[in-house]
Structure formats: C-alpha cells, structure tokens
Amino acid sequence: MRIVNLILLLLLVGLLSYYWLLHESELQGSRWTCNELSTNFISAPYQKYQEIGERYVLYFASSSNLTIFQKGKLVFKDGEHEKYEVIIDADYKVKKDKISVKYKKIDWHLKPQNAPIFVQDLDSLKDFETDLNFIINDEKLYFHNRKNHENTNFVCFAS
C-alpha cells in the first residue's frame, strides 16, 4: 500500500511540475494594437518636436517571445515631419498580473534622418529590462507601471 501511495504521490508531483513548467501565458499567441500621441515635451532634445505619433503592434509569438512592430511620425515645430518604422524583438516573462520585458534586438526599417537623439533613445532599449503590471479586460490590454506613473500607462486593443 505504501508503494502505491508513493507512486501516486510521485505521479501527482510530476503532473503538477509538468503543468507548472509548461503553463501557457494568457498573452501567448495574442496580437494587440496600441496608439500613442506625445506632446508638450520638457526635455531639451525633444523640445524641437511638436508631437510624436506612434502605433505599436505587439505580437506575443510564444510564452517567452514578443515582437513589437512600431511605426510613427515625428512632427517638428517648424512643420517638417519624418516617418519611422522599427521592429523590436524581446523576451518576456509573466507572473500573475506582472510582465517583465527584456529588449533584445532593434531593427530599423525606416530610420528618421533628422532625429539622431530619437534614434539613439530607441537603440538604447537593447538589453534594457522593464517591469509593468497588466490587465486584460474583454478585448483590451492595459499596461501600467508598478508605481502608477502616468507616463507608462497605456491601453492596447485585440487585433
């Protein structure tokens, strides 16, 4: 009887371990679209911009890989504007309602020529790690940072 109980216990531990190790994230396989418009910049290098409009497509390809397609338009105060497109590969981990993202690769498809600080800032994301809280509600994905600062709160929509 003890051997049967031991075998059942080991089987239960094995099944729980298997489930825990291979448990899929609720984000896995999902795609989200986000839009952001930034204005009224206070840092000196960004004061030359009237606005920066950005659109993101977040694709959670697996339980640990995230691909971000980002495109946007930089509008300068002198009326000039430049478009850009970049693909960002990242690793992510989810634990309950928290996501940790580590940016691995920044691949420019359309790089703005008159915005070296903007390009440098995006390029500096390589190897950067960030932690955010998230909530999925219906067809919406809400992100906010752990300190609830407004500058990192945004919403994405299922696509």
Image: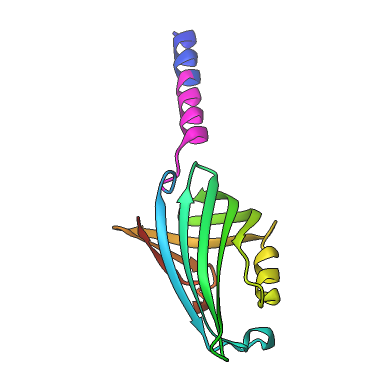
Q: Position of residue 8 (x, y in %)?
A: 44, 16
Q: Main secondary structure of the magenta part?
A: helix
Left or right relative to 132: residue 30: left
- Work out whether residue 149 or residue 48 is closer to the camera in this orientation and state it: 48
Residue at figure coordinates x 53%, y 50% from the top left = 66
- Work out whether residue 153 or residue 45 is closer to the camera in this orientation and state it: 45
Q: Is residue 67 above or below residue 53?
A: above
- Work out whether residue 71 or residue 33 is closer to the camera in this orientation and state it: 71
Residues in magenta? 11-26
Q: Position of residue 68 (x, y in %)?
A: 52, 56
Q: Is residue 85 above or below residue 148?
A: above
Image quadrant containing the N terminus: top left
Residue at figure coordinates x 47%, y 48% from the top left = 60
Q: Position of residue 101 (x, y in %)?
A: 58, 55
Image quadrant containing the C terminus: bottom left
Indicate the quadrant where residue 77 lies: bottom right
Indicate the quadrant where residue 106 lies: bottom right
- Work out whether residue 147 or residue 115 is closer to the camera in this orientation and state it: 115
Left or right relative to 28: residue 112: right
Residue at figure coordinates x 46%, y 73% from the top left = 36
156 inside magenta stretch: no
